[in-house]
Amino acid sequence: MPLIEANNVGIEFPVAPPNARSFRHLAIKAASRVGGRVSRSEGAFRFVQALEGISFTLKQGDRLGLVGHNGAGKTTLIRVLAGIYEPTTGSLHTVGRNVPMFDIGLGMDEEASGYENIRTRGLILGLSPEEIEERVPEIVEFAELGEYLELPIRTYSSGMLLRLVFSIAASMHGDIILMDEWIAVGDANFRKKTHDRLQEITGKSGIVVLASHDHGLLRDTCNLGLYLEGGRVRAFGALDDVLKELPAA
Amino acid sequence: MTTLTDGQVESRMVANRRRVTWERCMTDLAPFVTRHVTWRALAAGDIRSKYRRTMLGPWWITATNAFTALIMGLVAGRFLGADMKTYLPNFMISMTIWNFISSSLSESCFTMINAGGMIKAVNMPILIHVMRMVHRNLIIFLHNSAIIPIIWLVYPWHIGIQSLLAPLGLLIVYVAVVSGSMVVSMICVRYRDVPPVMSSVLQLLFFVSPIIWVPENIKGGELFVALNPVAYLLAVTRDPIMGSSPHLMSWIGALLFVAIATAAMGYIYTRYRSRVVYWA
């Protein structure tokens, strides 16, 4: 059964002052400490507290809508749930394979064909070559790119590329779907396909976390809400209650 | 990330100072075994991509190496007064192995830095980025070493049963290169002025290693060879190919160096790998 348990999760980003990335500076600092004087004139590391004290539990069937201003920490939290950032305080326990539905175009090679990029993307997402081959017919059918898949993707229009990228992302099977804003791509026809497919995916999966500013979408998709402000939880609970806390949209 | 008995994937991330325990180390290094398909396929794709639309494809690598051999053969004879029959094979084999070591270490400076975008966007064990680079260089090495049988046809040397030890030597070099690249790439993400240092170090290593010279001809050559880890790595790989069994000291030196390098890599990776995303 999929599960997400966040317990007092905090993320602190170190922001390096100009010389902190320099090995030479480190050596000089070390030497001056030996002499009895610690040089702090160049400035110490500063820290941005992106998240603080985030605690919540999500179970099978929960669909969480993440809301908050720009910079509140929604993207950071999504990436913590994806396992990209390890918490600097607290702990996170997840059960279930998570499917990231953000940055879905990463790692593509312009000179390689559509088919080759499907394989590359699959490898990056952690699939084995056999698993990728199993999914290829489904991806090909959904993308509706036909023979273009044999051509290098630099020949694609941006809309065609988005179709390919979305089709690959949509073929991933997992228990926990993480979305940083809804994906709406392509012409009107494909947008409907995308929408239907995403509804299907979020309907089938165990847990969905969706960060969005679109209240209508959130009401359609989510049952729970988390209102982040300045990296902290301002409200967590039933979606309608949480949306009421937001300043008038 | 562990797989539970019912096939579900479970992950527990607890913040602390990342104390290095044996268990943590083994979990963190597990992708070396479990994800090898990923980096091997990505590396093969990189090579295919680089040589797309070229006439010879990856065999250009072999061709350029052959050209180097030809030039050395024609020129070195006059400059160094060396006996080509023994010098050229020795030089070409040493050079091929050295190219693998130096290009891996030099590329490793920028591997994690360049992968920064992917590190911050995808949950992939970061060692995969380094392994992809090393594997790419390994493929290039294998193409380069296709020149060796050709040189053997021109300047044959005696090959005995000891030559079967060559893959073992290569394995030792491979492990050393992986450990070194991993450590260097992580240091370079954190301290951005290390890459030029690396480049100077590699230059120095090239000249103190028995590649263009042999110990007998250089004053103090024996000392350089005794103190230089690269010399041990070269010895265990080159000597079998040249038909002689590597000295016991070479084996001991090489294995000791690799053991230390791997232990250091294991420690540094386990301790700092979760920090890399904050440095990238």
Image (cartoon, coloured by chain):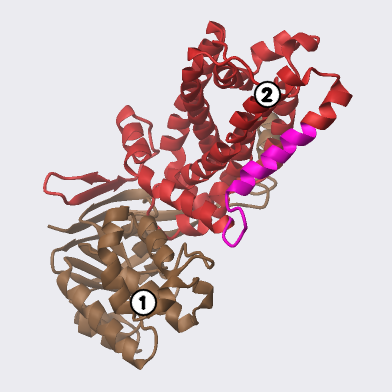
Place of residue A153 in the rendered image (x, y in percent of width and height, measured from the top left):
49, 72
Residue shown at 85% from the left, 21% from the top:
B80
Q: Examine the rendered structure and indicate whether residue B232 appears above or below residue B38.
A: above
* Label 2 SS: helix
Type of the residue with mark 2: Pro
Q: Please name whichever residue, A58 or A170, is drawn nearer the observer in this view of the structure.
A: A170
Q: Residue furthest right?
A: B78
Q: Position of residue B12 (x, y in %)?
A: 26, 47
Q: Residue at x 63, y 39 (%)?
A: B103
Q: Residue lying furthest bottom in this view?
A: A188
Q: Quadrant of residue A142?
A: bottom left
Chain seen in brown: A
Residue A203 sits inside the magenta stretch: no
Q: Which range of residues does the magenta coloring cover?
A: B51-72
Q: Tally the marks.
A: 2
Q: Is residue A12 left or right of residue A68?
A: right
